[in-house]
Amino acid sequence: MFVKKENFIFSVDDFGISAKANQNILKLVRAGKIDRVSVMSHGVFSKEEIDQLLATSVKLDLHVDLRNDINPKRKLAEGTIKRGLFFGLNYFLGKTNVKFVEKQWESQIDSFRKMFGVTPDGINSHEHVHFFSSYFEVIVRLSKKYGIRHVRFGKESNKERGLTNFILRWFRKRNYQMFMKSNLESSDFMVSFDWIKDLKNISNYSSDKKVEIVFHPERDEEMKFLENVNKNKEGESIIKFQNELIPIIGEMFRNKEISFATVEARSVEGGNFWEPIEKIEGKYLWEMFDNNIEWSIEISKKIENDYQKVINKYFELNPKIREDILRDGENWLGDKLLAWSKPIIREGLIGRQEIEKIKKDFKEVIKQKDKNFWGYFHGNIIGDHIYIGEDGINYLLGLNIVYRPGKGYYDFLRSLDWILLKVDNTNVNFECTVAWMKKYLGKFDWEEIKLVFALRCIGILGQDMLNQEDLGKGDRVLKKEILLKFVRREY
């Protein structure tokens, strides 16, 4: 099954409600199928399962409940309307004490922070009870108190049918002004998968809106659906751009406007590595690093420069695409800085305040330079995307266009951080990396370069080395020290 999901945020609920739910959710997280996990902090899970969640870049939300225990006799997907009506009756009769609920939920936030060592990325509730106005006030107060940024709500009212959804829409309307004044973040729309049963049945939403879809993987039918969905958004984007850019690059290469060619390629190893569909005799650039690293960097820089010509040509032909890519890029910066830094902080290699300083510095530069700080790039002009053919032609694979900070130089810094990871420290060290940055990027602001490279090195250390356990080549301890020096901008 192949579904276009650029607009979808896949969230799963009830981590901790049962061993089956935990097992299914962890399986989906490892497969990269989901974006957010909602945790019941009073649920049942092991330290190992907590560590497995923390080792990923998935957002961790708190799933508050009116009870502080799990009902072992509950039945899946049975009696939802009945339970909802029973709760609604108690609510309107005043039998559900708001002060008691606030105390319960604050206790659940404290439990989450103690077990996971971090504040929840977001907050929502079991069976959507936080939509009741008195409880929504509680959610807003607790979110402000603990610095929780995201709430499951929906900036706009969704378009789905059904009694449950009708009730939630009614409460949402009552809570709307409170939500707007809270400055909390939320998706544009929120729907539950059991309202729609299939993405084909979802109502039409504007192409620039984000839709959070809530799943319960403990249910066999929802687990099966998620297992069969292709959630590799980046892979989808690359396939799209590959089909559109191949003829443009072909014509520019034939006219000798650029120094590289391309061919149709496919992703392997989760989309991080691209290979030609039709075999080409030759080698990947990374296979030549040890023998001639200076030449490899020169090749990378030349291809990076020429790819800017390709991007400009593409936007001449497709001017409307530019704004869609821009929005995705601005969201990317905050999301990646948060996700990549988590394992580094957890390992005690860097303090949270140091990451906050980087975030603050990015905000300051963006405030000063706005769009002049951003540019459009390939995003991965690295050694496993450049293929050196025996026919004397250099091929660039995994074609993409992304919006990133560091106008004019992001792609070059991306090639350097990958080289730092993959090449032995005897061939690539701190000093020579700084020398390459100064040699090739001398016309740009040095402090801004250091800031963007700090972000890139957080990605290599947090995502590649700690999360994916890709330790590269050479002295791993020294490699971490070098990366941390770049993160701290101690040069």
Image (spheres, rainbow, N blue to C red):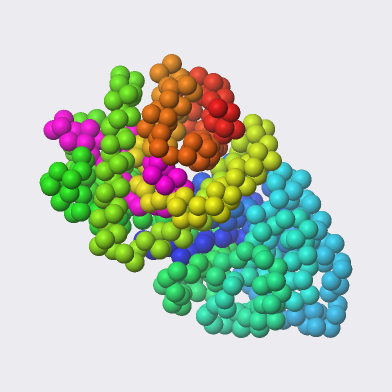
The residue at the point 40 percent across, 51 percent down is 375
Q: Nearer the viewer, residue 134 or 52?
A: 134
Q: Nearer the viewer, residue 487 or 31?
A: 487
Instruction: Name the spot of residue 432 as percent of width and height, x first.
Output: 43, 22
- Location of the C terminus by quadrant is top right
Instruction: Name the spot of residue 14 as percent of width and height, x first.
Output: 65, 59
Side (left or right) of 395 relative to 432: left
Q: Nearer the viewer, residue 435 or 55?
A: 435
Residue 68 visible in the displayed image: no
Instruction: Name the spot of residue 454 as percent of width and height, x first.
Output: 53, 37
Residue 189 visible in the displayed image: yes
The residue at the point 25 percent across, 35 percent down is 387
Q: Is residue 398 magenta?
A: yes
The residue at the point 52 percent across, 61 percent down is 10
| Residue interval drawn in magenta | 383-411
Looking at the picture, does residue 391 appear above or below residue 242? above
Q: Is residue 122 magenta?
A: no
